[in-house]
Amino acid sequence: MARKRITPGKIRLAEVAKLAGVSPITASRFFRNPEALSAGKRARVESAAKELGYVPNLAARALASQRTEVIGVLIPSLTNNVFADVLRGIYDALDGRRYSIQLANTRYSILQEERLLRLFLAQKPAGLIITGINQTADSRRIMETVDCPIVQIMEVGPAPIDMMIGFSHFDAAKAAIAHLLAQGYRRIGFLGARMDPRVQRRLDGYRAAITEAALFDPQLIVTTAIPTSVTLGGTLFADLLAKAPDIDAVFCVNDDLALGALFECKRRHMAVPEQMAIVGFNDLEFMASSEPTLSSVRTNRYEMGRNAAMMVIETLEGRRPAEPVVDLGFSVMERQSSARHN
Amino acid sequence: MARKRITPGKIRLAEVAKLAGVSPITASRFFRNPEALSAGKRARVESAAKELGYVPNLAARALASQRTEVIGVLIPSLTNNVFADVLRGIYDALDGRRYSIQLANTRYSILQEERLLRLFLAQKPAGLIITGINQTADSRRIMETVDCPIVQIMEVGPAPIDMMIGFSHFDAAKAAIAHLLAQGYRRIGFLGARMDPRVQRRLDGYRAAITEAALFDPQLIVTTAIPTSVTLGGTLFADLLAKAPDIDAVFCVNDDLALGALFECKRRHMAVPEQMAIVGFNDLEFMASSEPTLSSVRTNRYEMGRNAAMMVIETLEGRRPAEPVVDLGFSVMERQSSARHN
DNA sequence: CAATCGCTTGGTAGCGCTGTCAATATCGGT
DNA sequence: ACCGATATTGACAGCGCTACCAAGCGATTG
């Protein structure tokens, strides 16, 4: 038996079209490509839509058009401040646009990432933003075959899947060490936590710089797989001091560790920078207002998120960015904690 | 003319049903309510789906069923650590479940919130999580008429729209001040930034406690609409000292301000807590490992997010929580920065 | 003046799934 | 063995929108 499942009060495209005196398909076009309509009809549809308070049904649109206006974002952590800034950039770029964000947390697991990727791509996203350049072979293959703009963020490297925006963690760490060396420090320790691929590359940069200066010593390196925290910074710093009591500086792979190291210095009544220089990474807001102020490597996280989203949007709108790989660089912020070593 | 738009390679529910030897509707039921099938068919559909790598088309499902499996989340800030924890809780609760999250940032504007709310509700979300209890009258009316579980988070108060989980910011601030009073402090300053409704209630709590002790003095209060930061904490603390040089303690509405105040003390060579006690709010991770360790009011942010999501899910699954309003409480973490005043 | 072109508009059918109800199978009780 | 109740299964149409193609129409062209 045919029982119409009509929803009485709901305003559909057909209602708008009727009020505007056009066909439904013309009304549909108004929402997708207003320029295709003649000025008269455009105005009629617009006012009809406003009068009725029409809101398009995205599910119907997605089903009929076989695509969505959702941009998938895969990040490894929700807690890390670094990603908060990136996300803010992404959301800001999309503000007021038709696209929306679908966020997922890979928890630093590339297997989890692959699973989420399959889930995302099955729903035909308009675009994809994914963290880093270390995906599983399968993930990579899937992404190469899929037909939507993809931006890898947080770092740059060879062979982008599609587009890429970030900076060289290797160079950034190397520059931080170069700064310490230039300031006269010689026994420079390394503190690393979580040791995800990007942190690993910072370690490589440290190693390269310190080896070039013929100052390498494995005793100077303390790392752990444990997620980062300020408390952990203190602990790792204590470990480092136990292994190498004669260090005169420490490079921390992020600012939380640096802050933890600073507090540990205070607890031990070690003067910073006189007895111990400290350099962090990311340049979170607090680094500039601690006592002493803490040196760090500034990374452009908000811009990274914002630009990544813009690259996706522009590609979708047919204005593909001229340069698919964007290096946003970094800058070493030289502050009190790494002032010149007498 | 009828030209079928058939997508050749795609696996639809019909294909799965055919391979399993059942009708499409039975296969459909398998994915929504497996228990409704006989064991035999259930196994057949399951293996057919796996063999074909079937992934349901969510747009079609949403269109046909007139609902989505998306839970909308409205938060005022993406940067604030506090919400990072809440979000983590929400995402964790939904992990492995069918529901997904649609996140939106109100930027502390209830007008923006209302706009986003309309946008969300037009897409018929499965549920909604919204921050705070201060919505526009229109927002409130819209939410009251909509038929999906709604949880207000971050605080508790009278007249929940539907469900509510949080704690009393008034009581929490009052408890922090009570602690300082009990420790022997008498001239207790207040530092507030952003001054959103919840911060406002913390100010109310401060005022109530300090008035009860007959120690109220408007000179002790420094607030600003500027968003919070560590740097701002230092600045506000300096302002406070200028207005009331004789203060012996300061209560900061969040931990960033508290950290900024601590650094400012160090810059001024003021001993903490001997010359200046400091208490923060939220108990972020670093509070326990600073030097000196910083007292704070612990709030259960992760649990709040997690429970809010669970309340939505349980309602959706017909197991509505017995108690619609959950007070998660708080605890005053007494640390070195507010040690007993001689 | 017929042929051509580009712009705008409309008709038709179908996107993949599920709500509704009907039909059939199964079962225990008497 | 029969009956009604319950558990399973199926048929049909429709959710609201857009892809596709065709047609109308005035302007342009040789």
Image (spheres, coloured by chain):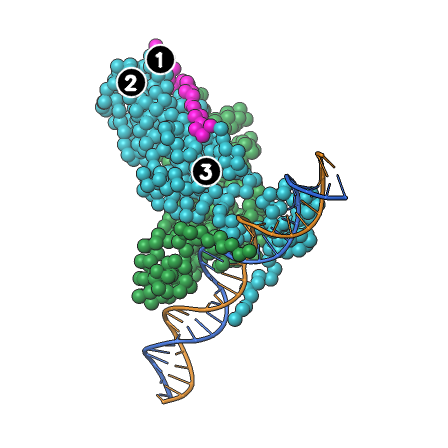
Chain colours: A green, B cyan, C orange, D blue
Residue B210 circle label:
2
State which quarter of the image contains the N terminus of chain A: bottom right
Q: Mark 3 points at which residue?
A: B149
Residue drawn at point x = 61 percent, y = 60 percent: B9
Give B216 or B286, whichever is nearer the viewer: B216
User: Whole-Å distance between the Cαs marked 3 and 2?
Assistant: 39 Å
Identified by mark 1, the residue type is: Ala
Which numbered disc, 1 or 2, marks the residue closer to the eye?
2
Residue B156 position, x and y percent, is: 39, 28
Which is nearer the N-term, disc 1 or disc 3?
Answer: 3
Chain identifier of the residue bearing label 3 in the image: B
Q: Nearer the viewer, residue B320 or A269?
A: B320
Disc 3 packing (10 Å; few <14; some 14–19; many ≥20): many
* Residue with the mark numbered 1: B182
Q: Residue at x 28, y 34 (%)?
A: B225
What amino acid is labelled 3 in the image?
A: Pro
N-terminal-most mark, 1 or 2: 1
Give the amino acid type for the residue marked by disc 2 in the picture. Ile
Q: Within 10 angstroms of label 1, few (less than 14), some, or many (20 or more) residues? A: few
Residues D25 and A107: in front is D25
Q: What is the x, y in percent for residue B25? A: 61, 51
In the rendered image, the quadrant that contains the C terminus of chain A is: top left
Image x and y of residue A179, in percent = 42, 38
Q: Give left or right: position of D10 versus A192.
A: right
- Tell which subunit mark 1 falls on: B
Reading the chain from its start, which is encountered first: label 3 or label 2?
3
